[in-house]
Amino acid sequence: MGPVRWASSTWCSRSSMAPWGEDGSLQGLLRMANMPFVGAGVLGSAVSMDKDVTKRLLRDAGLAVAPFVTLTRSNRNKYGFAQLSESLGLPLFVKPANQGSSVGVSKVHNQAEFEQAIALAFSFDHKVLVESAIVGREIECAVLGNDNPQASVCGEIILSDEFYSYDTKYINEQGAQVVVPAAIDQEVSDKIREVALQAFKALDCLGYGARRRIPDAG
C-alpha cells in the first residue's frame, strides 16, 4: 500500500469491503486523520467483522444464533469431526471468523469434506467457526440510522445453489435472486425487523448495516 493522499473532502463514504475495509482498520485511520465518515466506528466494525465475537455479543443480548464452536490454531485438534457432528448435527458450516462475502466458507457433510474445509478456513484466518446448518428461507433486512435507527422492509434471497457462497454472490449470475419485499407474514416481518434493530444496537453499529435471518423451516 502506497502513501495515503487525502482528497479535498469534508467527509468520507466508505465503500471498501472485507478485512481492512470492514474490520475497523480503515475506520481507525480515518479517525486519526480527523476525517468524518459514514458507517460504524472502530468498535462496531471490529466486532461485526469477527463472527465469533459477533455471535457471542448477540447471544449475550438475548438473540438467537446458530449453535457453534470456535477453533483456533492452538486448539484445532481438540474437536474432531465425530464430536462436532454429534454436538452440532449435520450438515455443518465451516468458515473463517474474519472474512466477508462467504470467502473460505464450506458446507460439510462428511469427514473428508470437514478436513478440506478446516484447512481452507485456516488458510484465511487464525480463528475458524464450525456451525450448525439452519434449514429455512434466507431473509435479509437493512438498518439505517444512528441513535434512532430504522429497519427496512424485508427482502428474500432465493438460491439456486446449495448455499450463499462466494460464487453464488459474485460469479454465477443465476445463483441467487433477491425479492423485495419478501413474501412473508406481517408478524414474521415485524419480528425480523425488530431483531435486526436489536442486533444493530448490540454491535454498536452506526449509519447503516444489514442483518440476515433464516427462520427455521421446521
Image (cartoon, rainbow, N blue to C red):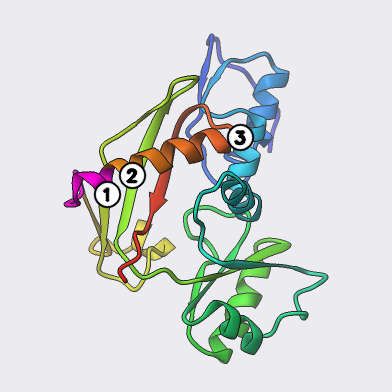
| Whole-number angstrom distance, CA of label 2 to CA of label 3 | 23 Å
212 left or right of 43? left
Q: Tag on residue 37?
A: none
**Amino acid carrying mark 1 in the image:** Val
**Amino acid carrying mark 3 in the image:** Gly
Label 2 Cα neighbours within 10 Å, binned few <14 / some 14-19 / many ≥20 = few
The residue wearing badge 2 is 191
Position of the C terminus by quadrant: bottom left
Of labels 2 and 3, the one closer to you: 2
Which image quadrant for residue 176? bottom left
The residue wearing badge 3 is 44
Range shown magenta: 180-189
The residue wearing badge 1 is 188
Q: Is residue 92 above or below residue 72?
A: below
Label 1 Cα neighbours within 10 Å, binned few <14 / some 14-19 / many ≥20 = few
| Whole-number angstrom distance, CA of label 1 to CA of label 3 | 27 Å
Q: Circle 2 sits in a helix, a strand or a loop, which is it?
A: helix
- Contact (Cβ within 8 Å) of mark 1 with mark 2: yes
Q: Circle 3 sits in a helix, a strand or a loop, which is it?
A: helix
